Image (cartoon, coloured by chain):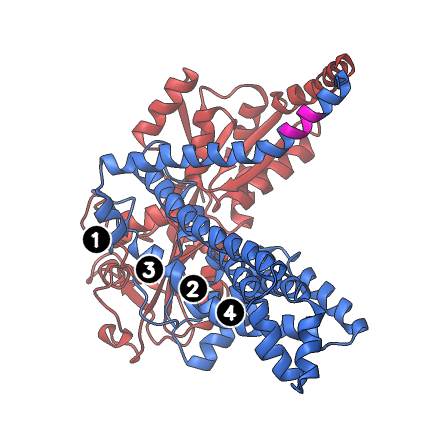
Chain colours: A blue, B red
Amino acid sequence: MRKRPHEFFIETAIFLAGTVSIFFVILIFIFLLKEGLALFRTVSLWDFLAGKDWYPISQPPKFGALPLVLGSLWVTLGAIVVSVPVGVACAVYIGEVAPRWLRETLKASVEFLAAIPSIVLGFIGLVTLVPLVQNIFHLPTGLTALSGSLMLGFMAMPTIVSIMEDALSVVPKSYREGALALGATPWQTIWRVVIPAASSGVIAAVMLGIGRVIGETMAVMMITGNAARIPTTLLEPVRTMTATIAAEMGEAVQGSPHYQSLFAIGIVLFIFTFIINLTADFFLHREMADLKKPRKK
Amino acid sequence: MTAAFSLLAVAVSLLFPFAFSFASPDVIQIKGSDTMVNLGQAWAEEFMNRYPETSIAVTGGGSGTGIAALINGTTTIAQSSRDMKPEEKDGVLKATGKTVQDFKVALDALAVIVHPSNPLSELSIGQISDIFSGKVKNWKELGGANQPILALSRERNSGTHVYFLEEVVRKGNGKGPEEFSSSVLMMPSSQAIVQEVARSQGAIGYVGLGYVTPQLKALGIKKSAEAPAILPSIETGQNHSYPISRSLHIYTAGEPEGEVEAFIDFILSPEGQEIVRQMDFVPLQP
């Protein structure tokens, strides 16, 4: 059948709209690589990844990104410890336990959390959470990795809860009915049957939560103190990769090693989020596949 | 297809007049130092009150951001709390073909602040350098209470950071070996430093004179161990007896003309300098 001209036009337009995002991701990645890899003409990869001193504007400059990478990982790790148990519990309550009228309200309010701009959360954290952390642990300052972790854990909650709740909802009703019919209590049904059946989705939710946390910038910059030191406890200030890029980009001379080093940090960050998203994607697809195919024993 | 093209043509013809009006020279763009952004805003408001036909837009972002914008030609005036580097002046010359004009418009005294409960009331430049470079870690080493020191600095994108590094941490030798210790906290704004010092007993930080509030204690500064301690104030800034004060600059590409020239004349006039005083900076003349 011959296509009419306007159909051809619409199809092309949709095709372009669909592929343009891939095109941009590739362009961004090429740009990142081009600017970031130029650093390694003057600094060795090992000095960059394993160097402990970050003095980008000194003479001679030192581009040791290890404290920044560890700072990001430290804050992220803390945020996972905070947000995963609470997030799982929240999703299970919303998805499995709460009465219908409460379910919708709860879900809407958790998703509303995601709509609060991160700088507002950062500001609230700065005036409420930071003094609290300082007083509870009797620290010289409350601007610590822990404050950042708590705040980011809070910010990862909407992602974790809403994806996990979706994952729980695709578990077939027959699983629950079967468990209950065999005499399992509701708690046993949730813990032994529903969560294991949705485990891939649960992992995907956690991974996407991590992706949200590791890329967060403003709130982290405001409340973690930004001292570029290798952290040993959660109660010390840390400097994350994102905060470093945000804080230093304004002053870096274009094309200078400092500018390139910030792009190199961007590459490291990109690799982290890429792996995290890939893992999440893998588990999301596996859950769908798992639940569709009949189980054989 | 033709419909889409004509639609595009209409959209372009609608958008372009706006694009040109944004770039019109009638709007004086001022960009740069965060220290100076409120000061620039105050000057601009007063100037626009007097000449309602002019319009001035003031934005911050840091001294380096303003200077970069001057090089890119996206701002008319760059505000800077540090001297422009020779390579930056070359950059402007190369990009615009014009020589940079430097106007000193005010002075800023940097106060070194501690928590009010801190028993110390004065420090020498050498002692402050030891604190920020990490050689001294506890207040008792300086005769204070037995309490770890929490040193707070501005971020590296701040002109104030660079000034403090060269004049205080490196004791005036800009190429000296001293660095901010890696345990110094880098704060995104002066307000954040004020807030943290006000609630942490072991804290020390530096901010412009305008940020000193009763919840903080500004230390007297000694140029050397033997020199007398001088408290930061408008008077000690003006007579240059206070050791940590600097000039605030306005840079333009080429000689300013028309409204820009009138604006800079206004800044340097007694009325403009009175605004400097009201904004808690130090006017050029008494």
Q: Secondary structure at mark 4?
A: helix
Q: Secondary structure at mark 3?
A: loop
The amino acid type found where label 1 is placed reads: Glu
Q: Which residue is mark 4?
A: A150
Chief secondary structure of the magenta portion: helix
Q: Position of residue B181 (x, y in %)?
A: 27, 59
Looking at the image, is mark 2 or mark 4 earlier in the sequence?
2
Q: Position of residue A260 (x, y in %)?
A: 34, 37
In-image side of B210 versus A158 (left or right)? left
* Chain letter for the residue marked with disc 1 in the picture: B
Mark 3 or 4: the one toward you: 4
What range of the chain is rendered magenta?
A11-15
Q: Residue at x 73, y 25 (%)?
A: A10
The amino acid type found where label 4 is placed reads: Leu
User: Disc 4 vs disc 1: Cβ atoms closer than 8 Å?
Assistant: no
User: Disc 1 vs disc 2: Cβ atoms closer than 8 Å?
Assistant: no
Q: Which residue is mark 1?
A: B178
Please say whether residue B55 is visible from this viewpoint.
Answer: no
Please say whether residue B217 is visible from this viewpoint.
Answer: yes
Q: Do the dots labelled 2 and 4 sit on one chain?
A: yes
What is the CA distance from the residue labelled 1 to the residue labelled 2? 29 Å
Asked if the stretch drawn in magenta spans residue A12, the answer is yes
Q: Residue at x 41, y 17 (%)?
A: B98
In-image side of B161 versus A14 (left or right)? left
Label 2 CA crowd tier, 10 Å (few <14, some 14–19, many 20+): many
